[in-house]
Image: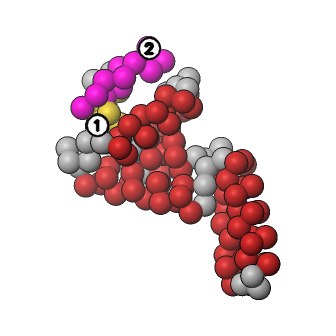
Amino acid sequence: MKALVINKKIVKVYDSIDEMPIINFQKYNKYLLIDSGIGSDADDIDAHIAHIARYIKNNDTKKALQELQNMRQNMHMINSEISPRYLAFAALIHSIDGKEVNDLSDDGLKAMLTELKKIKHSRVMDFLIWLKKK
């Protein structure tokens, strides 16, 4: 495990998929899958628009409609202040200030992110990229 200091709290995170419990691994993968297909931020909306335009140009209505639905979900998540990428990070947290994380429900992970609200986006991204490479 790796210890991070976030908002004056000691946060221990799993730094290997081999050491994390199955439920954490499943949540982590779930949110990365959502992020890769639907997205987490406004930049992903632009990517959806580019895909839709390409599908329309190729007369692939079915894929264009699916991409439009993905963009709609992406915009809803942004509006609801939900980030699959951040939820994937939250699923990697073992404990905060020595208190083990046991609530891995969607609401539990969102509450945990609220507790760590001052963490910088770049720090989350750096950790997720580092873990993916590992």
Q: Amino acid at mark 2?
A: Lys
Dominant secondary structure (helix, strand or loop) of the stretch shown in magenta: strand
First in sequence: mark 1 vs mark 2: 2
| Figure check: 44 above or below 130 | below
Mark yes or no: residue 59 visible: yes
In this image, 107 relative to 60: left or right? left
Assess whether residue 11 is covered by the magenta stretch: yes
Reading the image, the residue beneath label 2 is 8
Where residue 3 sits, quadrant-wise, is: top left
Q: Badge 2, how many Cα within 10 Å: few under 14, some, many 20+?
A: few
Name which residue type carries label 1: Asp
Quarter containing the C terminus: top left
Instruction: Please give the residue where the numbered disc 1 appears in the rendered image.
Output: 15
Is label 2 in a helix, a strand or a loop? loop
Q: Is residue 16 left or right of residue 109?
A: left
Residue depicted at 52% across the width and 46% down the height: 85
Placement of the N terminus among the 4 image quadrants: top left
